Amino acid sequence: MPSFGRHQPDKFFDRQHESEYNYIPFGPEGTITPITITSDVFASLFMKSVSQCLRQQIPQACQALANLCVLQLYDFSTAPCQVYQSIIRGQSSVVDTLDAPQGLPWLYYGLLSSQESTTFTSQVLNLTVDIGSGTGVSRLPFVMSTYSLNGTYLGLQKLTTQLQLCTPVPSERADDWRQIGYDYVASCTIDLASAINSTSTATFYDLFIEDSLGILKAVPIRVINYRTLAGRQPNLNADPLDYSSSVLFRRFFSVDDISGVQGGLLKVVRVPLAITVWIRKADSDGRIYIPVLDVAYTERDVSTLSEQTSISLQFAFSALYIMHLDNFWRVMTVVFSLVCATAGLLALYSARAWSTRNLTVSQGWDFNFLSRCILILAGCLAPLLFWFLLAVSAYWFFFYKNQTVMKVLLPWSDSDLHKFNAIVITTLICQGAYIIKQVYEQCTVDIFFIDWERSRGKVMAAGGEGKPRLAAVSVWRSIFMMNEWNKMQTYRRVNIEFSLLALYFIVEGLKVRYAATPQPNIHDLTPGLVNPILLFAVECLLWILLAVAQILFRAVIYERFYKDKLLDFVDVLSMANLSILAFDELCHGYYIHGRSVHPCADTNIGELNAFLRREQADLVPRRGMQDTDQQCFEVFTQKEMRSAFNKVYSMVIAEVEAQTVGNVAARLQRLSADKMQRRFNGADETRVRAYETVNHFARSFFDKNLKEFQYHIRERTYFERFLGTTPDVSQNTVLFHTPSSFTRLLLYGIEYHLLILYILIFTVADNGLGNTGAAAIITYGVDVVIRVIRKHFGASNLARKTMMDRKFLI
């Protein structure tokens, strides 16, 4: 024991304050409410400890003095900490620990050596850590040196659950937080009375970690609500990776229900609100820096506490593994910038192609065009951002979950998670806006069914009176095919109901959700808090797996051996002797060639089967255009051709709408509600003539009977397919043979974008609500809304554009 000289206790503090205890509650807003009490413990122990430590040099008394300073949260304005500081000034330190005073309790870092806190926290621990079964340790060997309030040494004890106030802690999970790479978070609401009763007396701890040579290395303590003499709180909201501005200590306590006793009655209790163990990965794989333990205390006035009343507090204990991710985020920033730049270039190219097809030289950029450009940008950006997010989250999932030696750790800070969540929300908004644009365009497409059927001769009126007239061509073929087309408008390959049920079963039933817990064992599905980045990866991968499985099943088995709904529609369209011409833009659209190779389509069952046998025997030309199998085309028309078509087609639509509006009032007067629901709106002669005019124009165009409007058919080159270029249509219309191009008029054609939307909605809802079932219900609700809107407005548009009463679509 070194000599303390002839120091007198009275010179370090004013004796009238020796038994006063200043409690400063530490709340979420950092509010200060001093509570000054006359502590029985300080009145009985303080002077005794100072005297015995200074004059008799009793180690236990020095420990007691140190404990009283710890109870004051190391505040240098208090008498115990003033005395302690004055005693160790000028004392030499232990060489290997740099800052521990010889023969005295070690409380402060940097008090003797005046070194920065980073000097102590940047030391790499001589310990190899392994996540799997390797040569290193798989659990952190924490040890605590314990002392009672009066300075009595209670011995060393292994740290397990002593700091966890959330009781009871299951014995099989007591050491979970010490497993290498396992992020552990436990929070609960504790009853203050129970916390007081569970501890018999205040116990003080010096925390150590044992290295590979068995040497105990001191673990720094950071008291979050420590205040300097100037009133600053340097440890508040400090970066756990940067300790340059932090003040570190050696000793801490769990529950203080001793010093707040005044006159034999407990007045004030101090308990921890949060305890966090930070384990920082060093630059070398499998190595860590000296851990740091954070403690945030709070005080409560319990003078009015009784058996009938209670005070509840929210407590959290956590052990978090962290590493510097600056390099990773720099790389991700570059990749993110490239993704955004690529989306911008794609959007610029798409907008330029659209303007080339739809705008003339005299037309300028208006609000509609700028709005379309924004939506095109959203449609280009959202999928790229989705795959970027999936790549980032999958990187963390597979590299973090499959490591045996600790190499990578998860993003831990709120700012990192907020960045990721912000990109997810942005992607969802962009994808939602693009889907709205696509559904609207599908519901407003200009579509017309071309009837190739010819009259089969002349017939006489009933009774043989009058002149013979051409036999009427049945319209029921058109009505039938319109109904089939209407049914296909919401057809998709991926069944959302099945996907959501399967996803719920896998995520919740098989507990795959807990593969997203922040622990490095991919096979450990122990329930716990999930990491939002890992959860995003798990749920996205499951969605994609289920979607791909359904698409492969339909493509390889269902559509090949049972029924291909799209090809069947094209085949029946050909047998019905009908074609479809649809424009989704001014000079862009799709054509399904359904002109029959048989003499007629209005026939009986015997003649129909005879036609089919001839086709089966290859005795008729092929169904496609120009005696080929090419029936489905993407159409790029001349502006002049579309203008001529619009002169007739727009007149038809206008007359139909005028007839509809003009007759509404009269029908309302004539019909009751029940009759209105069952009456069909009959077409007048003007509407019939308009239909025949459009039909004649379309047939003449595809028969190449319009000399001023010609077309040619060719295949797209690989370059054109990749870039989606717009061909030169200055001389004539171009038809590209693309078997499935017309599906872009259906939900089938935007299914890729719909799946991305549903995945984003599901992951955002699950992350926000923490409930997979609720996320599935929300996603299904969105799908129902989209299908209902698409079906209703699509059917209305089909009826209006094909000049049929809406009731014919059943």
Image: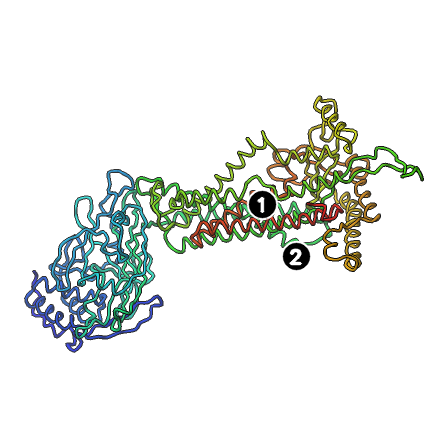
Residue 683 drawn above or below residue 620:
below
Q: The disc labelled 1 sits on which kind of residue?
A: Leu
Name the residue at 51% across, 42% down.
498
Q: Residue 225 in the image: x percent, y percent?
A: 28, 65
**Chosen colour scheme:** rainbow
The answer to whether residue 662 is visible is yes
On screen, residue 16 versus residue 298, left or right, reads left
Q: Residue 412 in the image: x percent, y percent?
A: 36, 52
Q: Quadrant of residue 598?
A: top right
Quadrant location of the C terminus in the rendered image: top right
- Classify mark 2: helix, strand or loop: helix
Count of labels shown? Answer: 2
From mark 2 to mark 1, how far is it between C-alphas?
A: 21 Å
Q: The disc labelled 2 sits on which kind of residue?
A: Phe
On screen, residue 582 versus residue 688, left or right, reads left
Label annotation for residue 392: none
Residue lying at the far right in this picture: please name it.
466
The answer to whether residue 728 is visible is no
Quadrant location of the N terminus in the rendered image: bottom left
Nearest the viewer among 160 and 284 is: 160
Residue indicated by mark 2: 367
Residue indicated by mark 1: 346
Nearest the viewer among 772 and 119 is: 772
- Classify mark 1: helix, strand or loop: helix
Residue 697 drawn above or below residue 158:
above
Mark 2–mark 1 contact, CB under 8 Å? no
